[in-house]
Image (spheres, grey):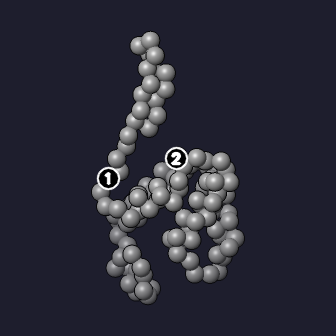
Amino acid sequence: MDVIHTESATDIFDGISYGKGASWLNQTFHFFGREVLKAGLASYFKEYSFKNTSLDDFIKHLSEAAVKCGVDRDFKAWSHSWLKSAGCNIIWHDVVEEDGKIKKFTV
């Protein structure tokens, strides 16, 4: 949600907000990789040091870093579905078996 002024920030953020944000950063690291996170953070801080910014600005830089690092996942769509929706994430899996053995397992 938008924070109109500094005083309203204290009313908006709570343990759930911080927990979800921390989980999102943790998943970003594990799902997209260290290099994407490092590159995205570096370009974000370079452009916005000592300036105001928004979540969309942050996601834009991480999304661009994912593309530059050759990650074949839509970072922006993943982030928005995770951050802009309530409830738990749903995880899907795909199993490829061959001769009774798991040949490929993806989540």
Q: Earlier in the sequence, mark 1 or mark 2?
A: 2
Residue at 56%, 77% in the rendered image: 53
Rendered position, 69 above or below 86: above
Quarter of the image for residue 97 reads: top left
Inspect this view and state whether residue 44 appears: yes
Of 103 and 37, the residue lying toward us:
103
Rendered position, 89 above or below 17: above
Of 71 and 8, the residue lying toward us:
71
**In the image, residue 72 lies at what x, y percent?**
58, 46
Disc ID at residue 71? none
In the visual, does 14 lie left or right of 34?
left
Q: Could you tell me which secondary element the residue under label 1 belongs to?
A: loop
Residue at 63%, 60% in the rendered image: 64
Image quarter in which the C terminus is found: top left
**In the image, residue 15 lies at what x, y percent?**
35, 65
Pointer 2: what residue? 31
Going by the numbered disc 2, the residue's amino acid type is Phe
Image quarter in which the N terminus is found: bottom left
Residue at 46%, 34% in the rendered image: 106
Rendered position, 47 above or below 62: below
Which residue lies most toward the left here? 87
Rendered position, 61 above or below 1: above
**In the image, residue 23 lies at what x, y percent?**
43, 55
- Disc 2 residue crowd, few under 14, some 14–19, many 20+, Cα 10 Å: few
Which residue lies most toward the top here? 99
Of 95 and 55, the residue lying toward us:
95
Q: CA distance from mark 1 to mark 2?
A: 17 Å
Disc ID at residue 88? 1
